[in-house]
Amino acid sequence: MTDNPYARWLQTDFELCNPVVPGDELSEIQGQVILRVHQVMGSGPKPTMYMDLEQLQVVDYLAFEGLSKAQREFIAGLHAAEPIRPEEMIFLALRSLFQYSWPAPTSNNDIRFAASYDHVLHQVLVQTALDLAKQFSSPTALLPYWGRLAFLRVMGDLPSEHVSRFGLDRVACTLVKKAKFNATTFALENDPVIGMNYALEPILKHLNRYLMHYQSTREMAGPNRLSRAWEGIAPIVLHFWSEISATKLLQSSLILFEDKVGTMVHWFTNDQVDFVLMHELGHVALAHPQRLQAERKAGRDVSVLRHEFEFAADSFALGLMRSKLVKRVRSVTDSSRTDPAESQVEHVVESLHDYQRALGSVYLLFLYMDFIQRAGELLRDRLGTQLNIRSQMDTHPRAQARLERLELMNLGEYLYTSPIERYAREFLDAVLEYATTLSDEELLASVTRNSG
């Protein structure tokens, strides 16, 4: 059998990782939150607290096996040119690490009690990040492991012979401080490097928590719901359109009720990060950087071609998702298996549901991108002389056009939809519509209140 180095590295990477916070300090963080909340609020409902442990690990991205000398030098240069501030990295990792899930509230006091937990947790994590920052201030500072984990998760699922055939075995990944994109591919001569926004996973998790919070609390809605929703997401809009401290990004209180909602947030985020990586792999496999370079050398305008390459990379990622489904179905229906027919059917249905969930997660990703694009344009057009806003978010096709193209790729099936996707479309439109009704003074106050 062909050796799959990505599966092997999943087992051995742990030896290279370090915890961003020792275990005893994790317990201390939880204890501080409980103590502070109970001192002010008294007793209340008990949450389920769980942690995404990949956020606990940090690692030197230059230490991984399989990197070429050129890739190591390039990654080192990226980090030296725009180093990630350690307190921001630690805060984002810790904020993504901790998550509370609450029983259904029976009173407004229950809701206030849960909100106070999230508020106090934010305060404790900001201080913890500042206290720990000095340990990560060297030029070769350690970075969160989630980027490498996602890379191995995607690559390990691909047939090794195809990885080699299409040159994907030469790809490396790293995290970089580039707030203006989710990910990009740096085309070295023979050794591509995929760079992912170091804040991508925490931001996506926060957006998923944001959506699930508002979707699951519709019946508790008060008169200030849209105002709170707009001010809660405005810092993320500014992250992509302007400059904002990482500690300001994720500070809005978002309460999740029921354990299954927290689990959904985790899976949505993993699916979205995987799609971003698969999209970048598509650029490599389809030789997009080399083809763009050839067009530029010939003196031709590449703007239309660049857009088509983005659509093609999205289609490539969708193809990998479908291949994963086919692979799983084949494995459980293999004629050599002796599983009962009922068990095989269950596994096939489970595989189909996983694919549908992943597709839904990708649709949410594009809905978020579309909202951020439109909201940023609103701020640019209305407040461009008062805020430091960029003229455009990026050079990609509009997110709505990319989502429509993905739907076209599914034309032979029933177009995907789900209650959460339908809610996301309506809710995000309502939030943006609310923002458009504000006067310029009110709009400026709404984005600086939590972002300044």
Image (tube, rainbow, N blue to C red):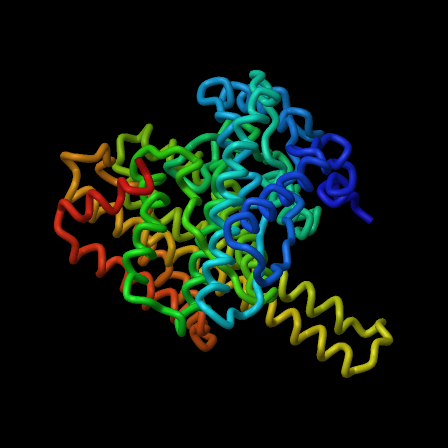
Image point (63%, 20%), residue name:
69
Residue sitting at the far bottom: 342
Camera-side residue of 206 and 7: 206
Say whether residue 193 is visible.
Answer: no
Camera-side residue of 359 and 336: 359
**Position in image of residue 389 (x %, y %):** 23, 36
Camera-side residue of 148 and 161: 148
**Position in image of residue 405 (x %, y %):** 37, 61
Image point (58%, 52%), residue name:
99
Say whether residue 270 is visible.
Answer: yes
**Position in image of residue 162 (x %, y %):** 65, 48
Q: Is residue 60 left or right of residue 203?
A: right
Residue 96 lies, with reference to residue 18, above or below; the image says below
Image point (70%, 31%), residue name:
18
Q: Which quadrant of the structure image shows residue 292?
A: top left
Image point (60%, 71%), residue name:
353
Camera-side residue of 425 and 161: 425
Q: How many marks?
A: 0
Residue 68 lies, with reference to residue 372, above or below; the image says above
**Position in image of residue 253 (x %, y %):** 44, 52
Instruction: Assign the C terminus to one quadrant of the image.
Output: top left
Q: Is residue 69 left or right of residue 224?
A: right
